[in-house]
Image (cartoon, rainbow, N blue to C red):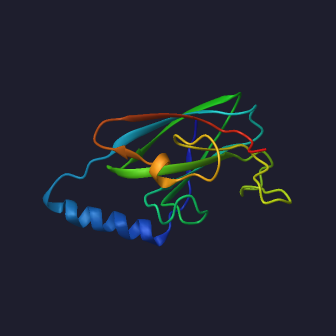
């Protein structure tokens, strides 16, 4: 499986540089984050956004990293590497291959979406967030239609 990481915003590059400079006197660690995503029969890739603050979650374009993961069948499992910290994720199944989450007339997503630990409604940072330390983390979530 090839996981494509999209370019990250300048803020993420600066954060990485700061971690690198700070890490000159110590060791910068990273951990594996494995996601097991259940979804309707795949007609396109799973798109993942990783967020690191309540102020940005889950707003499109404000994530610190984006991934495109090829999906087949009804479950997709993949692993990414992240630095220790607190994160939340937003995912959707890009069924129409538009590269953007598609909305209906009422402003509701037309494609299956999901978040860590959220089951319905607009996701909240306090519910969706999870901590990553030095040990691997595994999250299982389901992408569903809202309507």
Taking 25 as reference, is 32 above or below it? above
Residue shown at the point (78%, 60%) measured from the top left: 107
Taking 7 as reference, is 33 above or below it? above
Task: Determine whether, in the image, residue 29 is placed left or right of residue 8.
Answer: left
Residue 52 screen position, x and y as percent: 43, 58
Residue 23 screen position, x and y as percent: 21, 59
Residue 60 screen position, x and y as percent: 61, 62
Residue shown at the point (21%, 64%) measured from the top left: 22
Quarter occupied by residue 2: top right
Task: Determine whether, in the image, residue 128 is placed left or right of residue 21.
Answer: right
Taking 13 as reference, is 116 above or below it? above
Residue shown at the point (66%, 39%) measured from the top left: 143
Q: Quadrant of the N terminus?
A: top right
Q: Residue furthest left?
A: 25
Q: Tell which of 2 and 100 is nearer to you.
A: 100
Quarter occupied by residue 18: bottom left
Task: Determine whether, in the image, residue 37 is placed left or right of residue 56.
Answer: right
Quarter occupied by residue 37: top right
Residue 135 screen position, x and y as percent: 30, 36
Residue shown at the point (83%, 56%) measured from the top left: 104
Q: Quadrant of the C terminus?
A: top right
Q: Residue furthest right?
A: 105
Total count of labels: 0
């Amino acid at each position: 499986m090839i996981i494509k990481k999209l370019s990250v915003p300048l803020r993420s590059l600066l954060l990485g540089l700061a971690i690198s400079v700070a890490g000159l006197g110590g060791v910068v660690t990273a951990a594996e984050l494995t996601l097991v995503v259940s979804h309707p029969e795949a007609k396109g890739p799973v798109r993942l956004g990783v967020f690191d603050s309540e102020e940005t979650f889950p707003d499109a374009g404000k994530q610190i990293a984006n991934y495109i993961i090829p999906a087949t069948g009804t479950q997709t499992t993949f692993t990414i590497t992240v630095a220790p910290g607190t994160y939340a994720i937003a995912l959707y199944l890009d069924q129409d291959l538009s590269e953007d989450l598609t909305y209906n007339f009422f402003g509701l997503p037309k494609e299956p979406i999901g978040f860590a630990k959220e089951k319905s409604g607009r996701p909240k940072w306090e519910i969706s967030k999870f901590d990553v330390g030095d040990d691997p983390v595994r999250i299982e979530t389901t992408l569903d239609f809202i309507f």
